[in-house]
Image (cartoon, grey):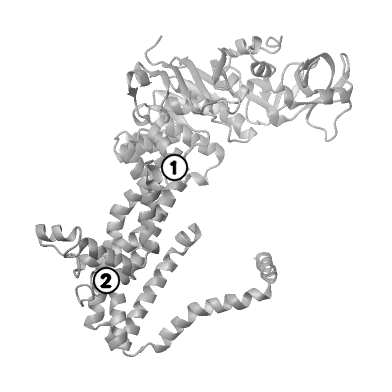
Amino acid sequence: MSSADLDASFTVRRSERFTLRIRLSVPPGRTVALLGPNGAGKSTAVEAIAGLLPVDDGQIELAGVLLDCPRQGVFVPPERRRVGVVFQDYLLFPHLSVIENIAFGPRSRNMGRKAALARAQEWIERLDLGGLEHCKPRELSGGQAQRVALARALAADPLLLLLDEPLAALDVTTRTRLRRMLAQHLEQFEGPRLLITHDPTEAFLLADEIYVIEAGEITQSGSAEDILLRPRTPYAADLAGCNLLVGNASRGEVDTGTHVLHIADTEIEGPVILTIRPNAVSVHRTPPAGSPRNCWETTLERIEPLGSRVRLLTGPPLPLAVEVTREAADELGLGRGSRIWVAVKATEIGVQPDGAAAHITREGEDRP
Amino acid sequence: MTARASRRRRAAARLPALLWLPAGLGLTLFLLPFAGLLARTPWRDLPVLLASDIVTDALRLSLIASLSAAGIALLLGVPLAWLLARAEFPGRSLVRGVVTLPLVLPPVVGGAALLFAFGRRGLVGEPLYDATGLLLPFSTWGVVVATTFVALPFLVITVEGALRNIDPRYEGAAATLGAGRWTVMRRVTLPMIGPSLVAGLVLTWARALGEFGATITFAGNLQGRTQTLPLAVFVALESDRDAAVAISLIMVAVSLLVLVALRDRWWRAL
């Protein structure tokens, strides 16, 4: 265990009915995702680790320093924790320009104004924000604001980087592009990285290890493979249905070897990993109207009930796990061997360069 | 532009005609006194009148008292607003009630209360006089105390409202960036409430400038020492109508100036 680790094992009681119990550790240079549905307690975990909310029991330790431990009467206030946070809605200071926002951290740590601005300028270059130095946050696009928030957190020279739903506020196209940018910068940050997200795509593509959190409890942890192959709860099982594909991207198209898919990101080139949520795929008995660009005919290979929904497995050219409601399945009269048309919107396909997430298994292996 | 104008016309057309009459009467009630004042103004003698000792003494005193009141309000009112907005303590609503009391209390009553507290035989006034020889009533300091007493609530209420309106998570974000409480207050909270703070200060100052009842009750009406502009108007009405009109004109001009300057910040905030 390295001395730069984040080690957290704590309890926060938010109300009579909700208690958050967290036990996780993040080594330096690794990204851990805390993945869970809304209301699972993810934001409470962020606040506790950042020092904005004291824990009720247990302890938080970062880089060998005890930050919070009620039993020993230890509580290090947020300003002395050196935990860099990228907040979900960024919380850029509205009265400060971009460069002043980024210089805020260095200045708060007693750096002179000039030195702090020079430091901020470096981060502006690094995150490709040149030209926006003197803009106010309200003049920025969502993607720009996100990068400023990341620059502001990193410029404060944190020991731990906490990202709270860093991409949730962005539209699908921007999200894909920024996820790539985020992967690069996460890799460059040497300390432990903790990513909070409700989006399995984000967790699978950005994190080395995933902790699944549901109703305040961590229900499972492990690599993306572990969770995809051996889901322990219905929620994780749902995540496991996520389709992962590999292919080669060029000008908004990805060739998987057996089929070509259109994606929203037209800039990405080279080997990529694609994720498609099973409920993002629509199923038809006849060619669907409106001619969606990703649409092909295939055979229904397997059909299994999943509560009020039905999980389908489609055949060549591109095997996919698909989820539809039971009513829809009945209405379409689906059965094994049915000829069907499937369609996926380009914007529903998650795209990530291969390599940034090389640990993810190849297509097909992740399905039971 | 034409579309907007026609839309506005249509909206106006939908108002019942019956509304126009009382609305017009209300407006007249506001405008007529000013018309009367302007009609009565001795424009030719105005420069001489405004240069008279009574007027210049009163103007000087009014500026000293109102600016001091605004300054003291800034020093005492902001922390008080902070406490009311952010601190949890028993009796907070009682404290808020006490702070806002001067808003509804007749200023004369306020002045009388000040007299009982700081007068020669007052609760605090007597030991204060015995110890230091300082006597607040009928002194310029007394004017400052009286105007501050009446004007302070404007600042407290404006700033407290602004503090309640900003998202405290900004302060949390600043803390994670290494800012201690003092830095957070100085670099995040205060700038974020800046416009409201300015509006509150100007309102406080304007209220202090117009203060009459508490001042005349507590500090008396001594030219050059406690006679502010409103007091001078009151006296001049009995002796020199032209001077009263001239001073009134100054006060109307100042009030209008303040309202116009604040129109965007304050009225929209309301």
In the image, A153 versus A304, the foreground residue is: A304
The N terminus of chain A: image quadrant? top left
Q: Chain of mark 2?
A: B
In the image, B73 versus A281, the foreground residue is: B73
Disc 2 packing (10 Å; few <14; some 14–19; many ≥20): many
In the image, B248 versus B127, the foreground residue is: B127
From the top left corner, tell me how far across and down residue A112 is, in percent.
29, 38
How far apart in space, not on screen, are marks 2 and 1 (Cα)?
Answer: 47 Å
Q: Is residue B243 visible?
A: no
Q: Which mark is residue B132?
A: none
In the image, A100 versus A125, the foreground residue is: A100
From the top left corner, tell me how far across and down residue A11 is, in percent.
46, 20
Amino acid bearing label 1: Phe
Circle 2 is placed at which residue position? B217
Left or right position of B61 against B196: left
Secondary structure type for disc 1: loop
Which residue is located at x 38 percent, y 87 percent? B41
From the top left corner, tell me how far across and down residue B187 is, in percent.
36, 44
Q: Is residue B15 visible?
A: yes
Q: Chain of mark 1?
A: A
Q: Which mark is residue A93?
A: 1
Labels 2, 1: front one: 2
> How many callouts does the rendering have?
2
Which residue is located at x 42 percent, y 85 percent? B38
Disc 1 packing (10 Å; few <14; some 14–19; many ≥20): many
